[in-house]
Amino acid sequence: MKHDPAVALLALVLLFPAMSGAAAPGQPIRYTHKVHVTDYKIDCRFCHVYATKSASAGIPSVAKCMMCHRVIATDRPEIRKLAQYWAEKKPIPWIRVTELPEYTYFPHFRMVTYGKVPCLTCHPGIDRDDIAVQRQEFSMGWCLACHRGRGVSIDCWTCHI
Amino acid sequence: MLNRRGFLKIGGATAFAALFGGCERLPKKLVPFVIPPENLALGESLWYASVCRQCPAGCGIVVRNSEGRAKKIEGNPIHPVNRGKLCARGQAGLQALYHPERLGKPLALDGPRGSGKFREIPWEEALRLLMTGLSSVRAKAPASLLMLTDPMRGHRNLVAARFMKGFGSPHRVAWDPFGQDAHLSANEAVYGVRDLPEHDLAGTRYLLSFSGDFLETGNSPVHFGHAYGRMRAARPTVRGKFVHFGPRLSMTAASADAFLPVAPGTEGFVALGIAHVMVRDKLTPAAVAARGLWNAGLKDFTPEVSEKKSGAPAADIEAVAREFGSNQPGIAMAGDAAASCSNGVFTLSAVGLLNLLAGNVGKPGGISFPNRLAAFANYGAEAGLLLPPAESGYPAVREAVEGMRKGAFRMALLSGATNPAFTLPASLKFEEALLNVPTIVSFASFLDETTSLSDLVLPTPTFLEEWGDDIAPTGHAGDAITLGQPVVAPFRDTRSMPDVLIAAAKELGGPAAIALPWGSFRECLDKAYAGMGIRLEEAHKDGGVFGGKTAALRPASRAGKISFPKRSEAAFEGDPSKFPLLLHVYPSISLHDGRGANLPWLQELSDPIVTAVWRNWVEVGPETARKLGLSDGDGVTVSSPFGSLQAFVFLHPAIAEGVAAMPLGQGHSRYGKHAAGRGGNPYALLPASVESATKAPARHSTRVSLVKTKMKGALVRTVSPEGQGLYENIL
């Protein structure tokens, strides 16, 4: 069947908003993982401190950012924004990048502490991102492939609780 | 060229976009902490042990803290008072913590005095106002400073006492509407110990209760509830029997094996009827030994006399006496309704007599008097400040009100949950007298009837946000010191009263500064307990120091010499022809003396007997209602010689005839949107009269009349009085 280009164009224009979820979100501060992780070799767990002991890896507190940025790069516009949040004692309303499918339970500490899974296995390329995006969809097949490969439990209730 | 098919495609796509275009995933926010709470582990709970201050029982609590928020309060399993249990009032402490009406900034009066209109001011200004007031009072007449609080315990009370002493004012008054004055006096007369005894309910075989609603209110409901459970079910071969005498079937009475309704104020005559049978029939060795009582007057108090006085059948009194005598160890105890008649000490002495005749004093399964301050021996005379006698303070309050009226006070410092403007009898005109004091400063978390009268309100943290300590007045063998710690970082800009007093003393200088040599209240506590050799970190993990060495019991010296109580009849105000019913008021299981009324969880907690929520009611028996032409759910005006209010009638199937009963706690005019404007305040019906021997408030000393009145709405109940299955309007 021959496609009418007008139809395709119209459909694209009309459907665009519905597809735009994959784009990099407009974060309140242009935080770059590349500078922190690749350039300065800061360990992921220095900021995401709860990854080793809690289900959620956690987003660093504003106080943690200010540990360094009280003195480092204080003249950059993005760091000024950070300093502004700190001065007003307001949290930074980051926009969530990585999403799990619904009805799943993902305990970071189990993967990181006991499974010794490197962070980049599930968050590929995030260390080189200027603006973090989710590159890996957490589909069940993808999870199971890894679980099978490592010989860990694939019981339903391991993830669906 | 747009053909039909193309048109349909575009139409379909438009519809699809219209339907789903708005369905793009909304960005989800990930909001970090600005400064993370201590010991935070995301998604992991931390439990902090502390002390509950929702009522004066002093239960130990553990609070689940998740990501810096207190999520749930539970009983501390190793605390001897409540052993892991906690009542609804304790659970509702969370709502006080998160209450939107909580004060977060100091308030200065912004309108006429007493209007309750305030504006927020910074702490610096508030403290300056406080210090200006205190300095000028101290320079002119230090004794014109009045401190009116609820009963405080632990080092918080010590700080307040030392502050006032150092300041030079003797006027420190603690008001507790449910003070135990009559119990203390009766115990002194009967046992020779002016203290509250420990009841070993768990080990007793027979429990006689006289108007004591110990399972729902009383001085330690969770402790008694737990002990009662063990009395009934924890021994393989013994199930303790429980008989309750009282004017109304309360939740406690409903738990009894037998409930015998008696007229208010006649419990003492019932107790003497039982004592009569015990001595007459020589039912216990102690009763044989107490033969002397017979001629001292006991021979006149036959069960028939008791029946005539109280309405409880003589045959039942005989039967109960024989059972009580032959099932030892047994305990007789009396509660608030018996204590707060004008003949309270007589009633309680008569009930105490039964314990002596049972010979259970100092024995397992009986009553004993532990020394609860043994650990504080090195405090000398100040030890008593850590656990002051549980008195109402009513004589001192009346004196203070008189002083205010005469202008004897230049400044008043108010604090505490007992809210005198709400809980004192209206005829005392507390509000009017207080406004006669030129400067009124309150330490408070909420604007209740009393704090609203202030010129300056200093916001305090809730008990979940501050350091403290407590020695429970009952429920342990003197082996429990409870420590309180903040379970969350304070949510509002608050300062605790002891902290403010310590800082004020420092600024005032002189003896007050010497008496309070610490930098903060926490330092005071840490020094005190570290000085006693307690390892603070361990103690805070446990929530206190429990199960230490139990000190020797205080000897109940007079127990050997039994004397006969002086006969006294309950007096009631009001002309019986005009006010035909006796008013029985009882503390609400959820709102206590009224302090819980601003917490919706407690408002919506239905009364265990009446099942009503969100407002109060008046209970009358079926026969009384028939005579007055009233039926269930009718609106009535309840009038006493001192005031009147409107309420809905609850037809109580098990209440002494000729009695109208009302729960206390509702009827606030202020105290926030959940509390204000819910029915009338029964305290306003009460006379200012006193118990004849102790001068404590005699709540049960007035008559009332009920007149049918049209009222809007209806009493909201979860269960119909017609039957458990017939649900009414809210479920």
Image (cartoon, rainbow, N blue to C red):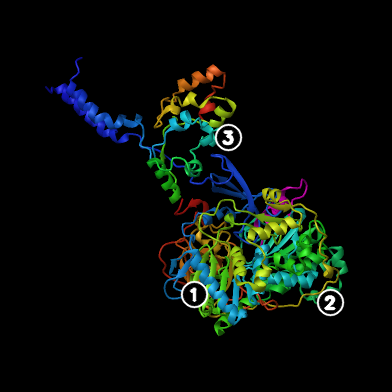
Report which quarter residue B315 is drawn in.
bottom right
Taking the view exactly as shown, the residue that stands out farthest to the bottom is B406
CA–CA distance in space, label 1 to label 3: 62 Å
Q: Which mark is residue B295?
A: 2
Report which quarter residue B297 is drawn in.
bottom right
Quadrant position of the N terminus of chain B in the picture: top left
Asked if both marks, 3 and 2, belong to the same chain, the answer given is no
CA–CA distance in space, label 3 to label 2: 77 Å
Which residue occupies the foreground of this view, A135 or B591?
Answer: A135
Q: Which residue is disc 1 drawn over?
A: B644
Asked if both marks, 1 and 3, belong to the same chain, the answer given is no
Report which quarter residue B392 is drawn in.
bottom right
Q: Position of residue B122 (x, y in %)?
A: 47, 64
| Secondary structure state at the residue bearing disc 3 | loop
Question: Which sits earlier in the primary sequence, circle 2 or circle 1?
Answer: 2
Q: Which residue is disc 3 drawn over?
A: A53
Which residue occupies the foreground of this view, A99 or B196?
Answer: A99
Asked if both marks, 2 and 1, belong to the same chain, the answer given is yes
Identity of the amino acid at label 1?
Ser
Task: Identify the residue at image location x=63%, y=77%.
Answer: B171
Question: Does B227 appear in magenta?
Answer: yes
Report whether residue B221 is seen: yes
Q: Is residue B298 left or right of residue B459?
A: right
Q: Is residue A122 left or right of residue A27?
A: right
Q: Is residue B172 above or below residue A52?
A: below
Q: Is residue B438 left or right of residue B654?
A: left
Task: Identify the residue at image location x=44%, y=24%.
Answer: A139
CA–CA distance in space, label 2 to label 1: 46 Å
Task: Identify the residue at image location x=46%, y=21%.
Answer: A142
